[in-house]
Amino acid sequence: MPIATTNPATGQVLKSYDPMSAEQIDAAIERADLAYRQLRGTTIAQRERWLTAAADLLEAERDETARLMTTEMGKTYAAAKAEVTKCATACRFYAAKAAEFLADEPADATAVKATRAFVRYQPIGPVLAVMPWNFPLWQVMRFAAPALMAGNTGLLKHASNVPQTALLLEDLFRRAGFPEGAFTTLLVGSAEVDRVLSDPRVRAATLTGSEGAGRSIAQIAGRELKKTVLELGGSDPFVVMPSADLDRAAEVATTARCQNNGQSCIAAKRFIVHADVFDAFAEKFAARMSALRVGDPMDPDTDVGPLASEGGRDEIHAQVRDAVDRGATVLCGGEPPAGPGWFYPPTVVTDLRPEMRMWSEEVFGPVAGLYRVSSYDEAIEVANGTAFGLGSNAWTRDPEEQERFATDLDAGNVFVNGMTTSYPELPFGGVKNSGYGRELSALGMREFCNTKTVWVGEGAATAGAGAHAE
Ligand code: NAP
């Protein structure tokens, strides 16, 4: 894949980059390692000042940054501005919370025959971050902010279609004051990931991306015995039960499916509706989906911009065609418009069956699958009947059902009467083929820490050390 900015609204290539050479990659890893040695010796207060400066820069430069993201991957300008603001918020969150999240945790010293015992969280070194284009700033920031605050350094291999946003991130952390090499963008293709992750100076990797990329990175990391966090795809269920507020559910369903032009791992993708309210919900949902305006992502009246790549657009159209050819019904959309740009209309498909691709595959665009079920148990069976387990949504005003959904949905998160969203305050991640490990919250920060047990005895002849070695 070329490393280049191509405007998805026009198909025009705007800027291309030569990939870094093996020598340049090696030099970048060396700088990351040196910067780690420096960063781990700084205080949390110092790193807090740098990360706060990054938040200030993000806010001051919000509009230019947002314009760049829209040009590189097609999200609406409004959504891009919101993404920049969210990144600044995450920086401030980790700047403020790091002292609490990294504080020594006392243990019961008596129980372990110590005078003092505690857990200390320490950085581990340079971490490779392999990131996707769909939230080109946010996906990186939710790794970078906690990792840098913990004293790690970052090596970013961003998606090949967002090189300018990738370079902007390196520049941002440098201007914020972090030491040279603390955060470095590697302009490389995915074939170079093996070289970087195999390097002994690189201590771990985080990937946000597809299942295929996850398997590949996990294999390399397994061979090299390195820790990974994998945030992979999803095919999130959005269950609507008879007691739900149908108007609100249809409104949120539309946003949940079409946010980011339908290209979000936590977009609701499968709408599982109880038969008692199926027809009413389907009508409201299809009407709202059809009413969305598709067009120039810079236009403030646009709801849905282009897909990020021609291949991505062709793939979702092939998934829809496969379903239709095997007997599915299209309630709205289903045909890409003529003309330049990789646009696709919001689409609702029903009468889906297990042999259709849409039943089991992730659909990464504004296409909703609508499923009719006749009971709570069948809703759970369809919702969990996927290889993925990232987010999930359930709409019901019945308190007992709310509790059951929270337990029974097999996913990394359950949002009841809302849509799945990431917050710095809450852990984020999946189960099954959606990956493992968690980002955000204290857990996200500690994924790339050495959770070190410290045991202190009296130092006298009767001390417990070694009494029960294991
Ligand atoms: P992708 O093809 O997996 O690309 C993601 C990143 O991985 C890019 O930097 C890509 O580099 C790299 N990559 C691809 N194949 C690789 C390999 N075999 N070895 C090493 N690196 C590799 O995914 P995408 O199509 O850009 O993004 C969409 C996918 O990401 C969807 O499945 C979506 O659900 C998932 N996603 C998950 C989350 C989450 O938090 N769970 C969030 C957002 C997106 P190149 O660009 O150079 O190919």
Image (cartoon, helix red, strand yellow):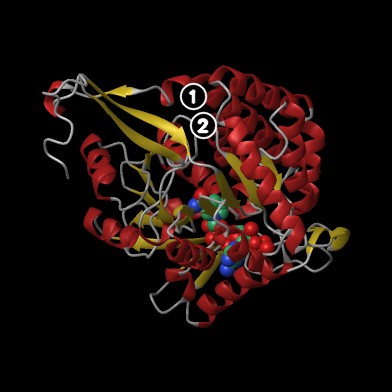
Ligand number 1: quarter of image: bottom right
Residue at the disc numbered 1 = 98
Q: Is 248 in front, or is 53?
A: 53
Q: Position of residue 416 (x, y in %)?
A: 36, 39
Q: Residue at x 43, y 70 (%)?
A: 359
What kind of residue is marked 1?
A: Ala
Q: Which mark is residue 150?
A: 2
Q: Residue furthest bottom?
A: 325
- Residue 308 picture quarter: bottom right
- Total tally of numbered discs in the picture: 2
Occupied quadrant, residue 38: top right
Is label 1 in a helix, a strand or a loop?
A: helix
Tag 1 and tag 2, C-beta contact below 8 Å: yes
Residue at figure coordinates x 60%, y 31% from the top left: 39
At mark 2, the secondary structure is helix
Taking the image as shown, residue 333 lies to the left or right of residue 237, namely: right
In the depicted structure, whether residue 74 falls above or below residue 88: below
Local crowd size for mark 2, using a 10 Å CA cut-off: few (<14), some (14–19), many (≥20): many
Give the Cα distance between marks 1 and 2. Answer: 7 Å
* Nearer-N-terminus badge (1/2): 1
Residue 218, how many percent across, how many down? 46, 63
Amino acid beneath label 2: Ala
Please tell me which residue is depicted at 56% across the width and 51% down the height of the picture: 202
